[in-house]
Image: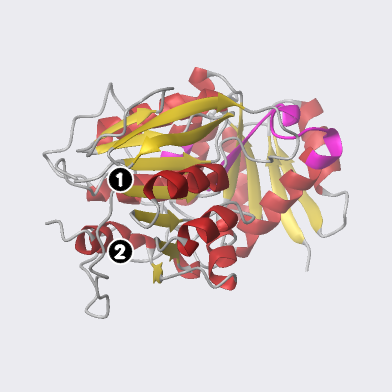
Amino acid sequence: MAIKVLVVDDSSFFRRRLTEILTKEGDIELLDTAVNGQEAVEKALALKPDVITMDVEMPVLDGISAVRQIMQQQRIPILMFSSLTHDGAKATLDALDAGAVDFLPKKFEDIARDKDEAGQLLRDRVRAVARKRQLGRPTFSSALSNRTDSAKPALGTRPALTRSSFERPKLNERVAPVSSRFQPSGKSYKLVAIGTSTGGPVALQRIITALPADFPLPIVLIQHMPAAFTGAFAQRLNSLSKIEVREAQDNDILRPGVAYLAPGGKQMLIEGNDRDARLRIKEDDSPRITFKPSVDITFATAAKVYADKVLAIVLTGMGADGREGARLLKQLGARIWAQDEASCVVYGMPQAIAAAGLMDVEVSLNEVATKLLAELNHG
């Protein structure tokens, strides 16, 4: 059965262009279009599309407010389109707060080498999120429930957040206690490495905001995200978390209790030894590397420096980035965790880990933080 999409944008040109791309292969149909946020809310509730594509800046009612109103009433995955600017990044993160499932840049050439590749990526993204419609997912607003009064105050004022009707039941509760079935391995570690893609901003916020200020290890975060977005995302995570979160810089020394987010459009490598490791941030023009940053590349360099002293976690995301890096880590004795299908927005990257026989522990997003602390024998 075809996936029915509601396209929302105040530009007739963009609505036409997006419709042509989405309907090219026949399994995605245009259900209707809307020219502003208010019309989007009305048509979403009346027509019940499988997926909505939503612009951020529109007349009458902006995209963020429209997302919030829709998600209060309907389980509909919403893909945001935004400009690759600092303001665009902040607005997109606010849309994820409101309940949007993912985002893409309005300039398709920013996400692919050519028009055909960009179109394929967009169609694949719509197909992937459409599969999750009936399952639900966690949202930024549910992740905020992990905060305690001791967390650093958010920078500036933020719109009030509401629970999204698209989130999985009970995921808005505080982090789950460790399951009695989970047995820590007893290993010692010197690094936590987390890789993710589609759905990652929500997942990372859920995990990082639940960690205590005295977290004993450095954390490297590899999130597929445009260059203009990673700085704003790191700032937001830092404002909500008890540990320090920063966008990684070249020659950063890895320190306990600090999370380093790989900058978009570049590769994050680890160099040195396990007592004195630092990050190297490299430009990457190689046509062979699809993702910048790449989970595989950071995991592989972590293997060289830390060998078996790494706990690698692969979260929600399309594709298989992280599998080969995890293979290298596994060969050296490191532990590999993968998010379970039920709590993923897209069960691609974790599935690749499981299918390759690399997974030591399968974990629900709601339990990652507590199981991580238990594995490290911390708290």
Whether residue 102 is in magenta: the answer is yes
Q: Which residue is drawn at 55% across and 40% down?
A: 224
Residue of label 2: 367
Q: Which amino acid does label 2 sit on?
A: Glu
Q: Which residue is drawn at 28% across and 48% down?
A: 190
Which quadrant would the C terminus be assigned to in this image?
bottom left
Q: Earlier in the sequence, mark 1 or mark 2?
A: 1
Residue of label 1: 208
Q: What residue type is labelled 1?
A: Ile
Spot occupied by residue 181 in the image (x, y as percentages of width and height): 27, 80
Q: Which residue is drawn at 65% across and 57% down?
A: 128
Q: What stretch is highlighted in magenta?
A: 95-117
Q: Which of 278 and 84 is in front in this view?
A: 278
Q: Report the side of 137 relative to 45 (left or right).
A: left
Which quadrant would the N terminus be assigned to in this image?
bottom right
Spot occupied by residue 9 in the image (x, y as percentages of width and height): 68, 32
Residue 143 appearing in the image: no
